[in-house]
Amino acid sequence: MKPSMNSICTVIAWQEPVGLMALPILSIDPERCTSEAEAVEPAIALGIALQLTNILRDVGEDALRGRIYLPLEEMRHFGYSEEELFSGVVNDRYQELIKFQIARVRAYYRTAEHGIAKLHPDARLPIRASLDMYRQILDAIEENDYDNFHRRAYVSKLKKALTLPVSWLRVQDTEGTWLGRLWGPFDRGFIQRPNG
Ligand SMILES: CC(C)=CCC/C(C)=C/CC/C(C)=C/CC/C(C)=C/COP(=O)(O)OP(=O)(O)O
């Protein structure tokens, strides 16, 4: 199905400048990137991914305030009503709706991560770690069976602490080295989720 033209476009419109503003502050690596333009798409994608993740985590809280940030057209497409959302109903239609949302956010994260290597070396680890940790909120929503009304999608401090060395390894220049040969397949095979 086509993405909804309301909320998702609004998020994109709000997040475009955020990612764009972050780029010159972080700065690019001139040895890996001839112009900032090469990093624009991933930078915008990261802003959108972070914001959409936030929206998915906070569906319940927002509903309590009478707010819906999920695209209404997509709710309708999955047969899930505003009344159900305000009552915190988690049924198979809602689970399908949230699965669809998560898949879209993960696609934005994948676009974003291609840009990390283009950033100045000092900026790579904080951005990589933010992406790796924030993305786990989506895994937590799945682990909660998509119930983001009654269960908070939470990434523990321990999980975050364990993620940091993974993020560090991911930003190392290991191509062609023994570490790269070991780490790359291990990361893809054992740490990353198949759809992550
Ligand atoms: C990947 C490359 C090449 C560059 C990175 C460029 C960056 C840093 C982009 C991210 C921009 C950014 C910091 C976006 C913020 C998104 C976000 C978490 C929004 C949520 O903010 P609020 O809506 O205030 O949160 P609450 O709802 O929790 O108050």
Image (cartoon, helix red, strand yellow):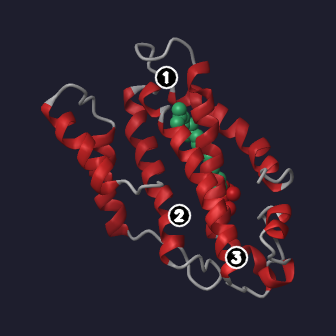
Label 1 beta carbon less than 8 Å to ligand 1: yes
Q: Earlier in the sequence, mark 2 or mark 1?
A: 1
Residue 57's place in the image compared with 173, above or below, is: below
Label 2: how many Cα within 10 Å (few below 14, some 14–19, many 20+):
many
* Residue found farthest to the front: 1
The disc placed on residue 94 is 3
**Pick the front one: 173 or 178:** 178
Name the residue carrying label 2: 138
Q: Amino acid at mark 2?
A: Leu
Q: Which comes sooner in the sequence, label 1 or label 3?
A: 1
Q: Nearer the viewer, mark 2 or mark 1?
A: 2
Q: Nearer the viewer, residue 130 or 136?
A: 136
Label 1 to label 3: alpha-carbon separation: 40 Å
Nearest the eye: 187 or 149: 187
> Which amino acid lies under the numbered mark 1 shown in the image of this protein?
Ile
Q: Secondary structure at mark 1?
A: loop
* Position of the N terminus by quadrant: bottom right
> Are the two marked residues, 2 and 1, in contact with CB atoms closer than 8 angstroms?
no
- Find residue 123 and report its horizontal and vertical position in percent: 43, 34
Q: Compare marks 2 and 3 and give the one earlier in the sequence.
A: 3
Query: Which numbered tag is attached to residue 54?
Result: none
Query: What x and y, as percent, mark residue 10?
Result: 82, 49
Q: Left or right: 17 with respect to 191?
A: right
Q: Nearer the viewer, mark 2 or mark 3?
A: 3
Discs 2, 3 touching: Cβ within 8 Å: no
Residue drawn where x is 79% and y is 42% of the image? 13
Residue at left 19%, top 35%? 181
Query: Marks 2 and 1, Cα distance to the nearest angstrom?
Result: 28 Å
Label 1: which residue? 28
Up the image or down, 112 lies above or below 186; here it is above
Element marked by disc 3: helix
